[in-house]
Image (cartoon, rainbow, N blue to C red):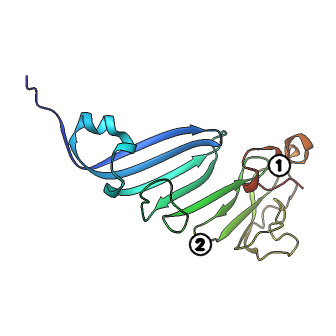
């Protein structure tokens, strides 16, 4: 039997999962590394020098497992998370009172909002860059923003929200990450 140590040469993939009060963060990194397998395992994500990162992405999910944001790095900062648009592109996600994803803010600021019927079917899809005043039923905020309808489902016509969305006890404002959720109307 040989006492030769396993060598790692070339790109490696490292994933770190961290549970935080706001949810679960996952960082995925691909980096150049040369050393032993034991050295790599002892260093982990924090030990691999950032100047060797080839790719870095991160996600945050809320305590219910819903994706809140994703980040894809194009310029790895020397320390910390860096700044949006300087070091990474970020996509943010929002949910209605029934937990359905109804809002996506893409890198660059394009907002996509989806309106659902009581059965969870897509009624309409809106796109814009300003959704101020928007609600789960009316992404246009009564015409106060620039959200425009781009898709309409003619087979669905019921706009009634599920009963849980109208109950004061389950309003979105009482859920985590309130800034990304649409208040019940």
Q: How many marks?
A: 2
In front: 82, or 58? 82
> Residue 94 appears at what percent x and percent y?
70, 55
Q: Position of residue 163 (x, y in %)?
A: 88, 44
Residue 102: image quadrant is bottom right
Q: Is residue 182 left or right of residue 5?
A: right
Picture coordinates of residue 109 (x, y %)? 64, 71
| Residue appearing at x 65%, y 56% in the figure | 93
> Label 2: how many residues lie within 10 Å, few (<14), some (14-19) or many (20+)?
few
Nearer the observer, 159 or 90: 90
Residue at the (41%, 58%) spot, across then down = 78
Disc 2 or 1, which lies upstream in sequence? 2
Q: Is residue 144 above or below residue 71?
A: below
Q: Are marks 2 and 1 in contact (CB under 8 Å)?
A: no
- Regarding mark 1 in the picture, which secondary structure is present there? helix
- Note whether 183 is above or below 168 in the view shown: below
- Name the outermost residue toward the left: 1
Residue at point 57%, 68% (across, down) = 107
**Which residue position holds label 1?**
173
Whole-Å distance between the Cαs marked 2 and 1? 27 Å
Query: Would you say 114 lies left or right of 33 here?
Result: right
Image check: 21 left or right of 5? right
Badge 2 is on which residue?
108
Q: Quarter of the image containing the N terminus?
A: top left
Query: Image quadrant of residue 51?
Result: bottom left
Please state which of residues 82 and 13 is positioned toward the viewer in this rendering. 82
Furthest residue to the top? Answer: 1
For the C terminus, which image quadrant? bottom right
């Amino acid at each position: 039997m040989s006492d030769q140590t396993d060598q790692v040469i070339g790109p490696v993939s490292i994933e770190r999962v961290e549970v935080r009060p706001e949810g679960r963060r996952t960082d995925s990194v691909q980096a150049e590394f040369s050393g032993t397998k034991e050295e790599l395992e002892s260093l982990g994500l924090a030990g691999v020098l950032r100047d060797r990162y080839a790719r870095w992405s991160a996600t945050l999910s809320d305590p219910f497992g819903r994706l809140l944001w994703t980040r894809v790095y194009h310029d790895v900062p020397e320390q910390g998370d860096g700044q949006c648009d300087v070091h990474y592109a970020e996509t943010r996600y929002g949910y209605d009172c029934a937990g359905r994803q109804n809002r996506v803010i893409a890198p660059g600021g394009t907002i996509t909002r989806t309106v659902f019927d009581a059965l969870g079917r897509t009624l309409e899809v809106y796109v814009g860059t300003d959704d101020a005043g928007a609600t789960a039923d009316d992404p246009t905020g009564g015409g106060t923003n620039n959200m425009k309808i781009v898709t309409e489902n003619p087979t669905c016509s019921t706009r009634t929200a599920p009963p849980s969305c109208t109950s004061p006890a389950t309003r979105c404002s009482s859920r985590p990450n309130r800034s990304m959720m649409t208040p019940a109307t």
